[in-house]
Image (cartoon, rainbow, N blue to C red):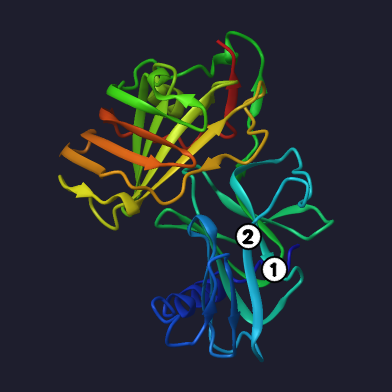
Amino acid sequence: MPSEICHPLAFLGALLAASSLAGCAKENNISQTADGSATVGPRGGIVDGPDDVELRVPSGALSGDTALGISVAEPSQYPALNADYELLGKVYAFTPHGQAFLSTVIVSLPDPGQATTLLRAESGGSWAPISSDMIAGRAEAAVTRFSFYAAAKPATTVINEPSCSGRGPDASAPTGSLNNLSGSVDGVDLSSMVDGYLQHDGDTLLVHLTPYAGACGHERNGVRRPEVTTIVLSLRTEGDLTTTTYPADSITLYGNTLDSTCATPAPGSVGGPNSGSGLSLAAVDSDHAVGSFDYVDGSFGSVAGSFDLPFCEPRQDLEPSVCCIE
């Protein structure tokens, strides 16, 4: 069993201790660099990595000044994933590999929207799930050692037959509409998106755009479509949804492409800081929301358009998901 797995109360305590560090980087005299590395001492502090990845080090976790780093790992650097899990987003290297701490520190990754756990792998080792929690659109874990970390979900069961063994999309689910879409994300033409759905956990709104109709029906029955790319805008709302405009810096954009078995063969693409006008909600109720978005990232892509989409949650009694060829 991985050494990071700890008693739930201990994990909660570590999260509370680490959360008190918010905004304290300057006070703790951390020498942070733009490439995701920093020198942290016994007083602790927060290390900011790429893609809004964070490391929160409480006081007393280090005995002396220590150089710590967070970077995006290339596939050639980390172990191959076993068949039990599917990576979501990128893999991040927390270095130096094997770095041990005197008490738990918090590894915090943005959640692309479907993560159920964090995976950890030693350099040259194998991936294993660790005790983690999904908090306000983030996947977080209390750990005692460094290595590779990634958000993940259980692998999809593949059913390669048209009937999908009775697990096709829910035909009674509501559908949505997308209008005036423009732009492209990681080579995907946004005009191919025809439907979508929304999910909101109280702190994060996920806007899913799909190139197939009946998106909510697919989600409700845990059905995945092979060889398609879906787009997800993750918006930090930090509370109830309101009819307002959320700024561009509160949005993270994801593009995930599934292969012929509905797996993500490589970590999904993640957009960076953007210069668009953000996301506006014109109407919100318990069933759906109406709004528009404008996201511009010169290196990754851009999306703009309007939507009228339903809120949609998957049935909890349908695990695992199935790969359905219709």
Whole-percent x, y for residue 56 in the image: 52, 74
In the image, taking residue 189 as reference, residue 248 lies left or right, namely left
Residues at discs 2 and 1 in contact (Cβ within 8 Å): yes
Label 2 sits on residue: 71
**Image point 66% across, 91% down: which residue?**
63
Residue type at mark 2?
Ser
**Image point 64% across, 74% down: which residue?**
68
Q: Quadrant of residue 141?
A: bottom right
Furthest-right residue in this view: 124
Whole-percent x, y for residue 275 in the image: 33, 47
Q: Considering the numbered disc 2 on the image, is that residue within a helix, a strand or a loop?
A: strand
Label 1 sits on residue: 95
Marks 2/1: CA–CA distance: 8 Å
In the image, taking residue 192 as reference, residue 141 lies left or right, namely right
Above or below residue 132? Residue 127 is above
Above or below residue 267? Residue 73 is below
Q: Quadrant of residue 20?
A: bottom left
Whole-percent x, y for residue 66 in the image: 66, 83
Q: 141 or 92: nearer the eye?
A: 92
In the image, taking residue 269 as reference, residue 129 lies left or right, namely right
Whole-percent x, y for residue 38 in the image: 58, 76
